[in-house]
Amino acid sequence: MQRRDREGDRMYPKKEEAERLLREAEKCNPGPWGDHSRTAARCAERIASSAGLDPEKAYVLGLLHDIGRKFGKRHLGHVSDGYAYMASLGYDDAARICLTHSFHTDWIEGYVGNFDTSDEETDLIRVKLRTLRQDDYDRLIRLCDAIAGAGGVMKMEDRMRDVRNRYGSYDPEKWEANLELRREFERRMGRDLYEVVSEDPSEGTCGSLEKTGKRRKEEDGADPLFDPDRSGKTGAAAACDRYASCVCGRPG
């Protein structure tokens, strides 16, 4: 079993290991969520460089925030799966990001999406939310999650409208909290957010997913972040039919 890097207080994998973990996860549950995570990671790295934070840590945490999707098409369940998976590897900082990126407060009912967790998983999330105090990295990854599409950076408002359209609602308090996150980090950087995250167009992080996401749904009915398998199976069940050697079992 991989364990955390014990140099100093580091509780997250090195960049190369994080990239390997994401590639492995995509084999278990292929879908646009992997490229969404890469966009979030690149945005986090750039913002961190301009905001006095550790760029490598920001990149790794952005890359792994949705790693719970490795275990199938789940909504709130991807939060508990990601937390348990990263904690099992000793990556406590990554584990907390898997949890905090979906919440702007310590109130689980503020989650935007379906509550598809067991009672035990729900209790885990509720307890952890109440005991964790969000830090700069938690807020940074929440910000990047709110602007990251699978095809590049999105305007925050477009991304939130996309989520609202898919789930039927979007907590107005979370909407305003995301806008305040943007203002907070722009004050810290002294620069416009989109200027910072779009400095290197050659890396493919610029542009908007608004047309991409709508086109995908119109053409094949696919959810821009989940992409069900054509056979009718979804998530890990479909992926494991194609990747016999993939270790897709849920953590814990």
Image: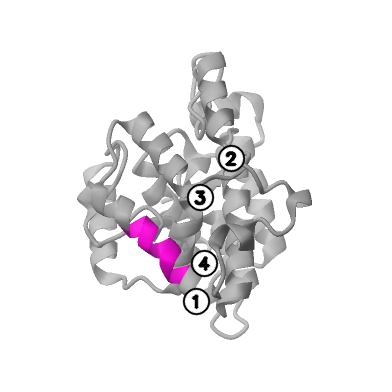
In the rendered structure, which amino acid carries the disc numbered 2? Ser
Q: Mark 1 or 3 closer to N-term?
A: 3
* Quadrant showing the N terminus: bottom right
Q: Earlier in the sequence, mark 3 or mark 4?
A: 4
Q: Residues within 10 Å of mark 1 (few under 14, many from 20)?
A: few
Q: Say which label, 2 or 4, has the lower sequence index.
A: 4
Q: Residue at x 50, y 30 (%)?
A: 235
- State which region is magenta: 177-185
Q: Camera-side residue: 110 or 186?
A: 186
- The residue singled out by tag 4 in the image is 91
At a point 57% along the width and 69% down the height, the residue shown is 191
Callout 3: 10 Å neighbours few (<14), some, many (20+)? many
For this orientation, the residue located farthest to the bottom is 8
Task: Report the residue marked by disc 3.
Answer: 147
Marking on residue 188: 1
Foreground disc of the pair 1, 3: 1
Real-space Cα separation, disc 2 to disc 4, in angstroms = 32 Å
- N-terminal of the pair, mark 3 or mark 2, is 3
Q: In the image, residue 44 lies at what x, y percent?
A: 57, 62
